[in-house]
Image: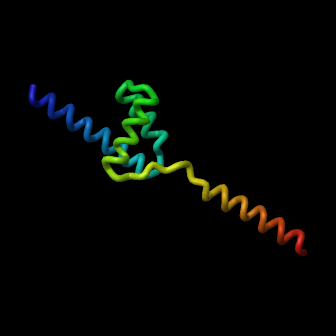
Amino acid sequence: MHTLQTLHIMLDDDRDGLLALLLQEGNAGQAIELYCDEMGATREEARAAVRELSRRYGIPLRRPALAPWLVLIAAVVLGSALVFQA
């Protein structure tokens, strides 16, 4: 019985480690999906669990990166300015 309990704890630690890795990479959506699949949780339960995990490990939840869009917009604006300047 003790062995099964230890195995269950190790699996929980593995899952939490994978979720933490996904959060560190900025993949909160994938972490939520994984939690739903593994635990049979609703999306709201999974979001709450992932938020708690991010708090426990000190990993900030990131919103989708805007930097690539800002670079693209800047390039278009700069390119347009150079075309009209010539």
Outermost residue on the bottom side: it is 86
Residue at 31%, 47% (x, y): give it.
56
The number of numbered badges drawn on the structure is 0
Rendered-image quadrant of the N terminus: top left
Rendered-image quadrant of the C terminus: bottom right
Residue closer to the observer: 33 or 61: 61
Q: Position of residue 67 (x, y in %)?
A: 61, 58
Can you say whether 74 is above or below 26 in the image?
A: below
Residue at 66%, 59% (x, y): give it.
70
Q: Is residue 80 left or right of residue 32?
A: right
Would you identify the image quadrant in which residue 12 lies? top left
Residue at 72%, 59% (x, y): give it.
73
Q: Is residue 77 left or right of residue 25?
A: right
Q: Is residue 69 left or right of residue 15?
A: right
Q: Position of residue 82 (x, y in %)?
A: 83, 71
Residue at 15%, 34% (x, y): give it.
6
Can you say whether 49 is above or below 27 in the image?
A: above
